[in-house]
Amino acid sequence: MLEVKDLIVNYGVIQALKGISFEVNEGEVIALIGANGAGKTTTLQTISGMLQPTSGSVLLEGTDITKVPGHKIVSMGLAHVPEGRRVFAGLTVLENLKMGAYTRSNKKEIEDAFERVYESFPRLKERQNQLAGTLSGGEQQMLAMGRALMSQPRIILMDEPSMGLSPIYVEEIFNIIQSISKAGTTVLLVEQNAKKALAIADRAYVLETGNIVLSGNANELMNDDSIKKAYLGE
C-alpha cells in the first residue's frame, strides 16, 4: 500500500533521513520506533506531503506522491495524526471533525463517517459542542484521531499518539488503534512507547539517526536483546 524508496531529507546541512526504504502492506499495523531525533516525525511528514525530500520517492498504492501537495494526498486516502495533536482549540469538537471531512462532498458519506467516529469515540459525541481547547489531553488525542478518520482514509499515520497521556488513556488509545486496524484501515505508527507499539504491530522498523538499522516481525523484535536494552528498558 505504501512504499518509501531511498528517502533523503535535509534540514539545511543536517541530513535527517539518509536514504531509508520500507513498505507497509494493506491491513498491517507497522511500528516505527527509535530514540528522539532519529527521524521518525520527519519520515511521516515527508510521506504526507508536509516536507519535500531531497531525493527518493513515496508511492501510495503504486502512485508516486512524492511531489503531491498534502491536501491532495488526504483525498487520495492517506491521513496523518500529527505529534502534539494540533486540534483547532478555538473550534468545537464538532467543527474540528467537520474540518477532517473537508475533502469529501458526499453528504451521506460524511454522515456515515460521523457515525463511525462517534461509535469509536463516544466521549466526542458527549462533548461535541465543547471547545477543543478545553478537552483533556487524552480527549484531544481522540479528537485528532477522529478528525483524521473523518476523511475515511485507507491508511493512517499516527505520530506519538500516547505522548503525555495518563496510563488509562494510553491503554484506551492503543485499544482504539487496534479497532481502527480491525475495521480495515492500515496503520503506520510512530511511538516512543516501544513496548506498547510492538505489542499491537505486525512488523516494525527501527530508526537510528536517519537510518533503518533493524526490521522484522514485531513479536521477534520485542524479544531481541538489543531492542530490549535500547527501547524497552530491560
Image (spheres, rainbow, N blue to C red):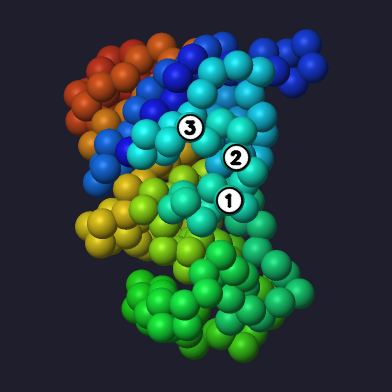
151 or 141, nearer to the observer = 151
Q: Does residue 29 appear in this view?
A: yes
Q: On the rendered structure, is 20 left or right of 154? A: right
SS under mark 1: helix
50 or 14, nearer to the observer = 50
Question: Mark 1 sits on what residue?
Answer: 72
- Sort mark 3 into few (<14), some (14-19) or many (20+) by Cα contacts within 10 Å: some
- Sort mark 1 into few (<14), some (14-19) or many (20+) by Cα contacts within 10 Å: some
Q: CA distance from mark 2 to mark 3?
A: 8 Å
Query: What's the residue at 35%, 15% (across, down)?
Result: 214
SS under mark 2: loop
What label does residue 68 carry, if any? 2
In percent of width and height, residue 70 lies at 62, 46
Three-letter amino acid code at disc 2?
Val
Q: Does residue 35 appear in this view?
A: no
- Sort mark 2 into few (<14), some (14-19) or many (20+) by Cα contacts within 10 Å: some
Q: On the rendered structure, is 186 left or right of 153? A: left
What label does residue 42 carry, if any? none
205 or 228, nearer to the observer = 205
Tags 2 and 1 in contact by the CB under 8 Å rule? yes
In percent of width and height, residue 133 lies at 70, 71
Query: What's the residue at 66%, 29% (across, down)?
Result: 52
Three-letter amino acid code at disc 3?
Asp
| Image label count | 3
Work out whether mark 3 precedes mark 1 in sequence or the reverse, and give the earlier one: 3
In percent of width and height, residue 205 lies at 37, 24
Three-letter amino acid code at disc 1?
Lys
Which quadrant of the figure contains the C terminus?
top left
Q: CA distance from mark 2 to mark 1?
A: 7 Å
In percent of width and height, residue 200 lies at 27, 44
Query: What's the residue at 41%, 77% (across, down)?
Result: 109
What label does residue 64 carry, if any? 3
